[in-house]
Amino acid sequence: MIIYNGIIEKSNFETDISFVGHILSIEEILYLMKSLSPDFVEVNDNIYLLSNYKSCGTENNRFDNSKQGKEKYINTISISDVFYFSEDQQSHNKSVQIDIGNFILQFWKMRLLYLFPDKEFEFILSENNLFDESGVCITFCQIIK
Amino acid sequence: MQIHSGPPNSYTNLNNGHVVVYGPEGKPIFDIDAYRVKGVFYNTTPSGKVIPSFGNSTKFNGPTPKSLIDFFGL
């Protein structure tokens, strides 16, 4: 017998799905799931988070306009900012934010590899700032072959 | 979960590199650090929960103006 562990340690599907069913509302479940599987967009062979690409309005930025630089900049999300105003003090713990950032990247990785099997991606977690975003940040870009 | 709030029409330096500006209702309306300025917008979910949002879509173009950095001591 070979056990293939889930992405998050100490998982027990029966217990975990019971928690989801009894504690979380349908709305909370859907928002969480949507954040793990965001919309992506392909522009000029570059892959971006759709919401971030729309926000930027252009592929160019003031830091790095190489192909990888454009993707890294536009795809950057500050995990710390997500929890910035949270009253849950546990969410301000850097190690918790790093774990959550890594979990999100794992789900994005699965989706991107499914959508673009011919492309290779680099997934990055920065513990201290990335471009003009502060705190724990995540991003991704294509690996140039 | 409650939304962070502060004195109306004021600001506070969080001493972690960020300054939060509070609006007339005491809700955060700007988050400023030495690199960028973000506005804080509020979305309401279908069930009526108010969610603060200051992702990339709320970021002002360009770096934080030097005048703000100096004023807030960032």
Image (cartoon, coloured by chain):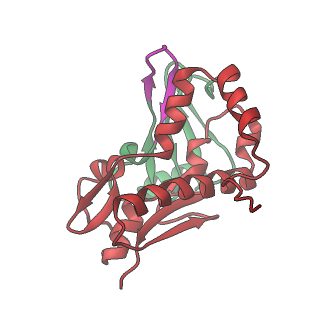
Q: Residue at x 70, y 31 (%)?
A: A87
Q: Residue at x 45, y 44 (%)?
A: B55
Indicate the position of residue A1 as horizontal and vertical percent values.
Answer: 77, 61
Looking at the image, residue A86 lies above or below residue B64: above
Q: Residue at x 34, y 64 (%)?
A: A116
Single out the residue that lies furthest toward the left.
A44
The answer to whether residue B1 shows anywhere in this view is: no
Single out the residue that lies furthest toward the top.
B48
Q: Is residue A45 left or right of residue A127?
A: left
- Which picture quadrant has residue A61? bottom left
- Which picture quadrant has residue A66? bottom left
**Which chain shows up in red?**
A
Looking at the image, residue A22 lies above or below residue B32: above
Quarter of the image with the C terminus of chain B is: bottom right
Q: Residue at x 59, y 20 (%)?
A: A25
Indicate the position of residue A33 as horizontal and vertical percent values.
Answer: 51, 38
Indicate the position of residue B50 as horizontal and vertical percent values.
Answer: 50, 21
Specify start and end residues of the magenta stretch as a single range.
B42-54
Quarter of the image with the N terminus of chain B is: top right
Q: Is residue A64 left or right of residue A23?
A: left
